[in-house]
Image: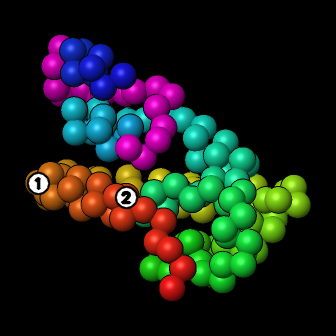
Amino acid sequence: MLAMIDETAPMLPKERPRYLMGVGTPDDILEAVKRGIDMFDCVMPTRNGRHGVAFTRFGQVNLRNARHADDPRPLDEESSWPSTRNCARAYLHHLVKAGETLGAMLLSEINIAYYQSLMQGIRDAVAHGTFDEFYQRTREDWARGDIAPR
């Protein structure tokens, strides 16, 4: 996909919005913006939420994994979204494993909130001419991964 963006984006008018349909991992979005894409849409935040996966500033967290069963930590205690800060991983794990609709709902909203935060960060960085720094910092956070329990 990125090779195709590299080939086609330079041919698109610079004064018009550049839309990439159906692209959706945070990594894909970050890489596409780096290559000049402006707009996106996809079902990834809600689809992954329905399947027990949360997107966070530390990357993806698969809450189906047993290692979360007794983990009292939130997904991200610094998130601005209440469910991300206040719901224990153990609770989210339980909801997902029990097939509770609330689990899919919470993870979908957590994922949408993360995507909104990511996109706001991208918009702010582009507006201030600091996208390269934002890109590096975001990739470093993802590389830290799902921080192990203390």
Residue in the picture at 48% in, 38% down = 24
How far from the left and from the top, in percent, is residue 95?
81, 65
Q: Amino acid at mark 1?
A: Gly
Determine whether, in the image, residue 72 is placed left or right of residue 105.
Answer: left
Which of 8 and 123 lies nearest the eye of the viewer?
8
Determine whether, in the image, residue 92 is placed left or right of residue 27.
Answer: right
Q: Quadrant of residue 36?
A: top left
- The residue beneath circle 2 is 142
Within the magenta stretch, is there residue 15?
A: yes
- The residue beneath circle 1 is 129
Residue in the picture at 30% in, 34% down = 32
Determine whether, in the image, residue 135 is placed left or right of residue 96.
Answer: left
Residue 19 drawn above or below residue 65: above
Which of 38 and 79 lies nearest the eye of the viewer?
79
How far from the left and from the top, in percent, is residue 124?
25, 59
How far from the left and from the top, in percent, is residue 17?
29, 29
Q: Secondary structure at mark 2?
A: helix
Q: Is residue 117 visible?
A: no
Q: Over which residues does the magenta segment extend?
A: 9-27
Within the magenta stretch, is there residue 96?
A: no
Q: Quadrant of residue 83?
A: bottom right
Q: Is residue 89 visible?
A: yes
Badge 1 density bin: few <14, some 14–19, many ≥20, Cα 10 Å: few
Q: Amino acid at mark 2?
A: Trp
